C-alpha cells in the first residue's frame, strides 16, 4: 500500500487471527486452512518443514496470509492461486461469511476480485499442497540457475527456500532495517502483459539483449518492466527527492529516509512517462494507492 502524506482519514483493521490446521489429508496431499493474520513466511517455512510442496518459491515475502489472495502473491514462478482451493470471506455488503471457490476469486497476475475492492475481508485461506520432500517443477530461469537444475526439474524443499531467500536478499527484497534498499513496497510496477506483436517490437538501443519475457494465458507475453525502465534511462540508484530506485533492484522504489508519498509518486510518474515515451508501453502500479493517484 502507498498512503497519501496526510494519512488515511478512516479506520484501518489489522487482523490478528492466528492458526493453521490440516482439514483433510491423504497419502498424496494435505488441505490446510490458514487464519488471515498468520505471518506469511511462517506459513511457508512450516510447509517446507512438513514436506508440503507448492509454496516454497514464495519464501521471504512480507505480510500476512490473508493478504496473499488479494494480489495473488507470486514470485519465482509460483503464485498462491496455484494452490488456493478456497478463501473464506466476510462480505461487507451483505454481512455474510462464506467460502469462495477459486473461480469466484478471479485470480490473475497480481490481481483478484479482492484487489482495489473494499467489499471483502479475507478471514481464512485454504490451500491444497502435494506431500513431497521436493519442490514443484522450477519455472523461473534465475531460480533454476541458482539451484543448478534445468527448468521443469524439482529440488529439495529446504534447498529451494534457501535459494529463493538468497536471491531475494541480493535484490533488497527481504526486509532489513539496516538496508535502505529494502524500504519499499516490493515491486512498484507490474510487468506489462502484451500482445506478441507488441512485445516483438521492443528493441533496445545498441547491443542490449531483448527483454526477458514469459508466456501468459491467451498467447500473451509478460515483459520485464525492469528491462523497460532501465532501457528508458532509469538505472538502479536513479534518485528523486528523498526517494530512489533501489541500488539492487530496478522495480523497487525506495524511501532513502526523508521520502514522502508525493516524492515517491513523482518518481514513479517520471519513470512511467519515460517508459511510455520510449516504448509506447504504460506501466501500472502494483501497490494499492490510498487517497493518492499515479
Ligand atoms: C520487500 C518486499 C518484497 C515484496 N515481494 C513481493 C513478492 O515477491 N510478490 C508479491 O506478490 N508481493 C510482494 N510484496 C508485496 C507484499 O508483501 C504483499 O502484497 C503482501 O501480501 C502484503 O501483505 P500485508 O499483510 O502487508 O498487506 P497490506 O500491505 O497491509 O495490504 C495490502 C492490500 O490488501 C488488503 N488486505 C490485506 N489483508 C486483507 C484481508 N485479510 N482482507 C481483505 N483485504 C486485505 C489491504 O486492504 C490492502 O489493500 C513485497 C513487499 C515488500 C515490502
Image (cartoon, rainbow, N blue to C red):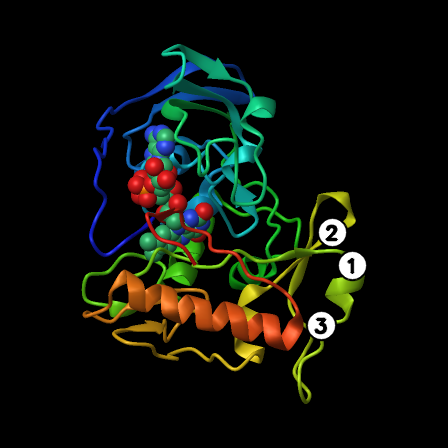
Label 3: element kind = loop
Q: Is residue 136 left or right of residue 56?
A: right
| Whether the residue under disc 1 has CB within 8 Å of ligand 1 | no
Quadrant of the displayed image that contains ligand 1: top left
Instruction: From the image, tell me which residue sits under label 3.
Output: 202
Q: Earlier in the sequence, mark 2 or mark 3?
A: 3
Q: Are marks 1 and 2 in contact (CB under 8 Å)?
A: yes
Query: Looking at the rendering, which quadrant does residue 178 occupy?
Result: bottom left
Instruction: From the image, tell me which residue sits under label 2.
Output: 220
Q: Is residue 55 left or right of residue 21?
A: right
Q: Residue 255, how many percent across, how many down?
A: 27, 67
Label 2: element kind = loop
Instruction: Decide which of 117, 165 is in the foreground and name it.
Output: 117
Seen at 40% across and 54% down, the residue is 293
Q: Residue 259, how many percent across, how many down?
A: 24, 68
- Distance Cα–Cα, label 2 vs label 3: 14 Å
- Distance Cα–Cα, label 1 vs label 3: 10 Å
Specify the quadrant that holds the C terminus.
bottom left
Amino acid at each position: 500500500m502507498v498512503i497519501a502524506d496526510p494519512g488515511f482519514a478512516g479506520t484501518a483493521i489489522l487482523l490478528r487471527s492466528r492458526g493453521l490446521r490440516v482439514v483433510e489429508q491423504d497419502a498424496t496431499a494435505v488441505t490446510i486452512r490458514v487464519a488471515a493474520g498468520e505471518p506469511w513466511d511462517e506459513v511457508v517455512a512450516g510447509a517446507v518443514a512438513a514436506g508440503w510442496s507448492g509454496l516454497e518459491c514464495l519464501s521471504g515475502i512480507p505480510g500476512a496470509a490473508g493478504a496473499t489472495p488479494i494480489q495473488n502473491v507470486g514470485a519465482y514462478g509460483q503464485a498462491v492461486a496455484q494452490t488456493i482451493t478456497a478463501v473464506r470471506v466476510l462480505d461487507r455488503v451483505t454481512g455474510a461469511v462464506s467460502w469462495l471457490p477459486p473461480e469466484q476469486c478471479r485470480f490473475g497476475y497480481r490481481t483478484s476480485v479482492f484487489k482495489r475492492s473494499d467489499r471483502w475481508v479475507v478471514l481464512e485461506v485454504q490451500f491444497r499442497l502435494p506431500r513431497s520432500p521436493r519442490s514443484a517443477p522450477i519455472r523461473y530461469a534465475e531460480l533454476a540457475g541458482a539451484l543448478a537444475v534445468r527448468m521443469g526439474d524439482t529440488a529439495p524443499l529446504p534447498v529451494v527456500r534457501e535459494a529463493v531467500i538468497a536471491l531475494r536478499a541480493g535484490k533488497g527484497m527481504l526486509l532489513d532495517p539496516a538496508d535502505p534498499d529494502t524500504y519499499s513496497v516490493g515491486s512498484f510496477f507490474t510487468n506489462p502483459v502484451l500482445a506478441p506483436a507488441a512485445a516483438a517490437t521492443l528493441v533496445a538501443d545498441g547491443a542490449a539483449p531483448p527483454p526477458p519475457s514469459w508466456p501468459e494465458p491467451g498467447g500473451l507475453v509478460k515483459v520485464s518492466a525492469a528491462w523497460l525502465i532501465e532501457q528508458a534511462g532509469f538505472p538502479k540508484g536513479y534518485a528523486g527527492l528523498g526517494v530512489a530506485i533501489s541500488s539492487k533492484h530496478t522495480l523497487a522504489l525506495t524511501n532513502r529516509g526523508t521520502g514522502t508519498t508525493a516524492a515517491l509518486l513523482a518518481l514513479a510518474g517520471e519513470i512511467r512517462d519515460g517508459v511510455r515515451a520510449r516504448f509506447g508501453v504504460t506501466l501500472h502500479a502494483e501497490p494499492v494507492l490510498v487517497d493518492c493517484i499515479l
